[in-house]
């Protein structure tokens, strides 16, 4: 049976086939749907999923342009569905999926460099429609090109409201008597929940479909968090079968979106109900079922996961020391030989808790420190507008989304422009030769000596020299720019050679960009 | 033969006997002078020294009140000199020498707590008279109670002028052709010096006598640096005999001053002409000849000295990481079981070099971080007033003394007042129970549990909560003060019990002081 479906899709776009199927019993668990997609350069056998209301869905991302055929099979229906379509050239803002490149960096499938400068809104897809739309509008006017968020809802300080939808059929526990003192929040509150972990709530997941697609169109990667410990409903404490059932459902729904990354957990080591064996088993489910090999990692609390595991594509790091975090980027690169993405390096904010009350200056400083070392920092904001907001109803970007109020986002956009101007597009590496400035240079394959360095970005961080003496060699000429990373100015200092002095002005957060002239 | 000498001296004061003696040959090397001082509670056999112009000197500090006698002997003269005097009660500002107390802390001989908050002016005693007097005047109006400085002159960036006096007879190298590019400064420049390392220049040492005494009267400890690597004259590269000869001379002159501490070196590990065995030999010379057992340590460059050595009374630390230094205080206390004194934690300044260009805010932050952990931070200032000063003639407090221009000294004075109010006077220890504030509490002998804590000083450092929830127990009442460590205000928040909230205001550098009411 041939369906009436779209005949064209962009390369790296989402191709979806939606077909009717059986509704008796539990369609999520009792039936399966699969599809084989074939083109001149690839053949992919993918799993589909039940989307409620008698509809079954398969999704596919073509990696090439050209003609494709597909055929759908499985116990969901007595019918065999098949069809064909054409994958056409991508539009200008579609650069394909993101993959690891040059060991420590990333690029889009079309070769364009991708320098992740992400943000975090853990529970934004669990807020009301108006707030979700506001979050998207905020993302539109900022430069973040990745966002981390959770599929499961969140229970934590400043996050006591129930989500707009739950992922499963059932009823949540009542929290009318919740003790809101910070010290009491970590108490387990799982009695009173009643869920069927084999029956998803399609509304919950359809909303996430929509949000991922909107992010994709905005050029923003969706770093999907599969599990987390901030829970009063029991989603962090299901059995292995239920976990795997959930993960396969998520894979079937989302892996065809080119902008999806898999984050197995936020703060995996605070999920006390799972062991390393559990995480490894879940990783295997992903590897076995994600035909696109989307980027995969797992985010830590007090202790990094063992990022040497072969399924991990990049280090997803939370700082483990409030003083020093991104400053370890180079060590982490060397240890794991993978890109270093910093998801949590304290947030611009002013809340009661120390991970969420640094200044914009300090967060931007951390962004530059990470970037100069060839790492990729992440943003979050926990900024109460008044002391009266210090309650359950606060809207904090870090979790709820909404508006940004902080001083860091515009500076992060400025940094993204500086990074876009790195020659060769292969990212930066740290130069240990300089002890009192953080100096990034082109992370070329040949990093044997200074001679290959045509580009130096000196970042002075919290140091504030009035002037800086520089010397590279006697003969080369260098174009020098003075960059004020806080006030977002770039000022041309002219061309220099031999020993020279740049007046940096005695303020913190200055940088000097030095480019060798041909 | 009885001399005409003072008949009274304060307990812990300096008693000096000056007698004529032989002048033929080399009086510094060819003759010796010793003296025995005896009172009801002590008997001390001390070495004296030749002071030029045919004068020999012995110095003594009485540790008790009461009658003393002395007799002088040695090859310096055919005469035997003897006499007696009375050690009388100390004046109000004389609390005696400083000694280690309660393992990690210090107190004066009379039991008054001493919380070192030092500064550094390496070469202030080598500057002209007017500048030295200005330094003393600056110290008078500030709260520093220790100063580090060198006996030998200093050659380094911003320090190219010859000292007003040299320690030895001879002539220095010429530096009219010195290459002043920073990169060239570490070149050895020792040719052209001509010194007699067995003939001291008494003028050089007499000036230091005077300065130590002036500091003593101001209640400021003199942390005397015996050796250092910033040298173009060869004083860092003498032989073992010459080193020992110098150290004994210094001991004979200065150990009777109650405010003297011995710092064997600044950045010992940059003194490439000496080995650990040399430092240990020098330490033995000090231990064998300093009858007062003055405080002794040795300051590092890249690597701490082995502070477990029994001759070391306290850790004298330079931070080895520009991001984190004093934050390791607790680890260092545990490792060495001795007081932790931070001599160098980057300086308030704006010079070309990264150890000398942090803001006042950052230096004060480091002071509080150290102090909350029961360590003792040190100040320095390298603040150019104009870009034109970035030359040889700059007057920078860190080396030359003079005036202070920075923002940290007044805040350090404020901190000294807060420390003076710690109950029991035995200093602070860090409370690891709190992860997102640096909490100091009384370093009582019984530190087994929270129950002994009647005093908590929460320092938020660069974190800036808008408010802070606190809870200690249900029943106790606590007096709470909000401290703005930068604006130097203390505001009484009232009495609280159980769960309570303090509005901290959302600025960095705030502290909350909590005192349990009886």
Image (cartoon, coloured by chain):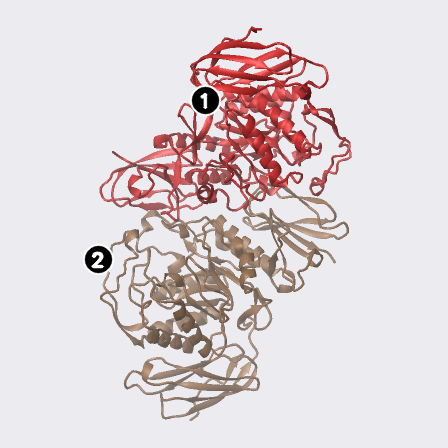
Chain colours: A brown, B red
Please rate how many residues cluster around mark 2, counting C-alpha atoms within 10 Å: few if below 14, some from 14 to 19, many from 20: few
Residue A255 sits above or below residue A82 on the image: above
Q: Chain of mark 1?
A: B
Q: Chain of mark 2?
A: A
Q: x and y percent of residue A76 in the render?
A: 35, 87
Which is in the foreground here, disc 2 or disc 1?
1
Q: Which mark is residue A203?
A: none
Distance between the alpha carbons at the discs numbered 2 and 1: 62 Å
Is disc 2 in the same subunit as disc 1?
Answer: no
* Image point (73%, 27%), residue name: B195
Q: Nearer the viewer, residue A11 or A35?
A: A35
Q: Secondary structure at mark 2?
A: loop
On the rendered structure, is A385 left or right of B357?
Answer: left
Question: What residue did someone put label 2 on?
Answer: A177
* Image point (54%, 33%), residue name: B406
Q: x and y percent of residue A492 in the render?
A: 66, 50
Q: x and y percent of residue A199 in the render?
A: 30, 77
On the rendered structure, is B349 left or right of A399?
Answer: right
Question: What residue did someone put label 1 on?
Answer: B96
Q: Nearer the viewer, residue B80 or B152?
A: B80
Instruction: Specify whether residue B134 is in view.
Output: no
């Amino acid at each position: 049976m041939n369906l009436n479906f779209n005949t064209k899709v962009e390369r790296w776009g989402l191709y979806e086939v939606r077909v009717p199927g059986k509704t008796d019993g539990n369609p999520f668990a009792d039936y399966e749907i699969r599809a084989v997609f074939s083109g001149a350069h690839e053949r992919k056998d993918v799993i589909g999923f039940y989307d409620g209301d008698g509809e079954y869905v398969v999704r596919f991302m073509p990696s090439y342009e050209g003609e494709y055929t597909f055929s759908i099979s499985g116990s969901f229906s007595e019918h065999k569905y098949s069809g064909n379509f054409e994958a056409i050239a991508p539009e200008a803002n579609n650069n394909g999926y993101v993959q690891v490149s040059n060991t420590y960096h990333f690029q889009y499938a079309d070769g364009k460099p991708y320098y992740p400068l992400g943000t975090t809104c853990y529970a934004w897809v669990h807020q009301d429609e108006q707030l979700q739309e506001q979050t998207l509008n905020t993302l539109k006017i900022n430069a973040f090109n990745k966002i981390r968020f959770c599929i499961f809802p969140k229970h934590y300080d400043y996050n006591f409201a129930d989500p707009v939808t739950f992922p499963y059929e059932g009823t949540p526990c009542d929290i009318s008597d919740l003790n809101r003192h910070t010290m009491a929040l970590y108490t387990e509150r799982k009695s009173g929940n009643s869920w069927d972990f084999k029956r998803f709530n399609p509304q919950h997941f359809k909303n996430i479909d929509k949000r991922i697609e909107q992010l994709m169109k905005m050029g923003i990667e969706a770093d999907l968090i599969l599990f987390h410990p901030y829970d009063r409903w029991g989603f962090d404490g299901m059995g292995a079968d239920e976990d795997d059932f959930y993960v396969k459902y998520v894979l079937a729904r989302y892996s065809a979106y080119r902008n999806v990354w898999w984050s197995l957990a936020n703060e995996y080591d605070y999920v006390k109900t799972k062991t390393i064996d559990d995480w490894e088993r879940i990783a295997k489910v992903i590897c076995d079922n994600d035909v696109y090999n989307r980027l995969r990692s797992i985010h830590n609390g007090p202790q990094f996961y063992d990022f040497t595991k072969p399924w991990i594509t990049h280090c997803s790091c939370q700082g483990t020391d409030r003083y020093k975090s991104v400053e370890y980027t180079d060590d982490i690169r060397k240890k794991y030989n993978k890109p270093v993405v910093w998801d949590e390096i304290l947030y611009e904010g002013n809340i009661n808790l120390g991970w969420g009350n640094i200044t914009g200056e300090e967060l931007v400083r951390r962004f530059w420190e990470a970037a100069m070392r060839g790492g990729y920092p992440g943003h979050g904001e926990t900024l109460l507008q008044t002391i009266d907001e210090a309650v359950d109803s606060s809207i904090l970007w870090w979790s709820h989304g909404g508006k940004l109020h902080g001083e860091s986002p515009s500076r992060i956009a400025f940094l993204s422009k500086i990074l876009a101007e790195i020659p060769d597009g292969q990212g930066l590496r740290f130069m240990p030769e300089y002890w009192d400035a953080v100096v990034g240079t082109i992370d070329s394959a040949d990093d044997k000596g200074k001679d290959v360095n045509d580009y130096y970005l000196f970042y002075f961080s919290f140091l504030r020299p009035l002037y800086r003496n520089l010397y590279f060699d006697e003969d080369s000429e260098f174009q020098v720019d003075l960059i004020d990373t806080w006030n977002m100015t770039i000022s041309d200092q002219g061309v220099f050679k031999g020993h020279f002095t740049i007046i940096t002005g005695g303020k913190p957060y200055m940088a000097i960009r030095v480019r060798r002239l041909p």
